[in-house]
Image (tube, rainbow, N blue to C red):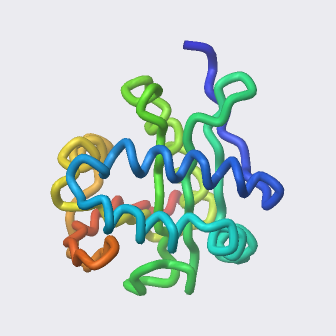
Amino acid sequence: MNSILIVPAITAEVELLQQIGKQSFLETYAAVNTVENMEQYLQENFSIQNLTAEMTNPNSEFHFAMLNTQAIGYIKLNFKDAQTDRKNWQAIEIERIYVLKAFQGKKVGQQLFERALEIARQARAPYLWLGVWEKNTNAIGFYKRNGLVEFGTHTFTLGTDEQTDLLLKIDLPLSK
């Protein structure tokens, strides 16, 4: 596979972000959730209005994974009050790490994760954390292989279904 580049996303690319977000979310979760809950979640969370608000939040960052000129995934990072769970405002959250199914297993997620680690270290965050659905065993395995450990749970609402996310983190000791 050609070299993947991780580049910052800009607000003008909101429609591309929406397309990748919807497609990857459907590819990952449609088979194990109801059509109604999926439609409600996608409509509420991946509208152009909602994504634009997220992209213009100064405490969130989006980065695309690019293969040549094609966006094949993205990551969303949250800082301070943009985090979905307020455990530690100095920490950084990965809210989304999405890779299109055709490119999974090709180290794209790994490169996005490594970019998140780099950003968190540069920010001198005490740890990087995320929530992952307790039934998403592939993602849980990926994160645990990368050194994340469970430190709690929180509720993730998909349509009308309240699901449990495991909270995972990796401590980032400050270098001397």
Please identify the quadrant where the C terminus is shown.
bottom right
Q: Residue at x 61, y 38 (%)?
A: 65
| The residue positioned farthest toward the front in the image shown | 36
Q: Position of residue 84 (x, y in %)?
A: 44, 79
Total labels drawn: 0
Q: Does 123 appear above or below 105? A: below
Q: Decide if residue 157 is in sight here.
A: yes
Please identify the quadrant where the N terminus is shown.
top right
| The residue positioned farthest toward the right in the image shown | 12
Q: Decide if residue 113 is in sight here.
A: no
Q: Residue at x 28, y 79 (%)?
A: 160
The quadrant in which residue 34 appears is bottom left
Q: Position of residue 104 (x, y in %)?
A: 40, 30
Q: Residue at x 49, y 32 (%)?
A: 108
Q: Position of residue 114 (x, y in %)?
A: 50, 43
Which of 38/11 is in front? 38
Q: Residue at x 41, y 33 (%)?
A: 101
Which of 31/98 is in front? 31
Q: Position of residue 149 (x, y in %)?
A: 23, 59
